[in-house]
Amino acid sequence: MGLLDSIRRDIKAARERDPAATSDLEVALTYPGFHARQLHRLAHALHTRGFVVPARLVSNTGRFLTGIEIHPGATIGEKFFIDHGMGVVIGETSVIGDNVHLFQGVTLGGTSTRRAKRHPTLQKNVVVGAGAKVIGDVTVGENSKIGAGSVVVTNVP
């Protein structure tokens, strides 16, 4: 699985989940969630190789350009889609499975200042509604849907 195939899958995810998306080109040029994801790919690659400051610079540039904050340490699966992404925050130790869909204002936040797993894990096919907050080292199980405005602080089967 190559980088270009992975990017194509991100575009396909946007086209499948957003009925307003009219073409691959439109997604690639105008979707902030797509842009944030691509910048995260670069930031994450730098971060995992120990280039922490350059990774954070890329991440901060992405936040400035898109309004979406994804820590370079976060792990994100395939076919990830952020819809209307303004205000999305994804913390450092978050793990996001394949085919996950986040709406605007979602926070995957931590509750600890320890250097340990302190952010959520979203398994495959999870949808998190607008404004929802998933806080702490909790796991949201496969095929779960978190309603808009929810606050989740315990595991979801």
Image (cartoon, grey):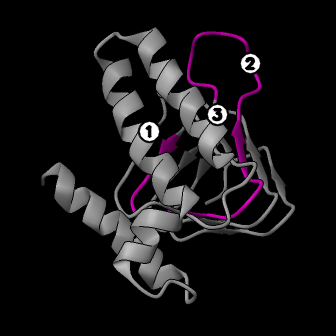
Residue at position x 79%, y 57% in the image: 132
Badge 3 amino acid: Asp
Q: Secondary structure at mark 3?
A: loop
Residue at position x 37%, y 51% in the image: 77
Q: Nearer the viewer, residue 100 or 41?
A: 41
Q: Report if residue 112 is visible in the image.
A: yes
Q: CA distance from mark 2 to mark 3?
A: 9 Å
Along the polypeptide, which appears first: circle 2 or circle 1? 1
Along the polypeptide, which appears first: circle 2 or circle 3? 2
Which quadrant of the structure image shows residue 86? bottom right
Tell me if residue 117 is in the magenta stretch: yes
- The residue carrying mark 2 is 112
Which label lies toward us, 3 or 1? Answer: 1
Q: Read off the magenta span.
A: 95-118
Q: Secondary structure at mark 2?
A: loop
- The residue carrying mark 1 is 40
- Whether 73 is drawn above or below 2: the answer is above
Q: CA distance from mark 2 to mark 1?
A: 23 Å
What main secondary structure does the magenta stretch of the protein show?
A: loop
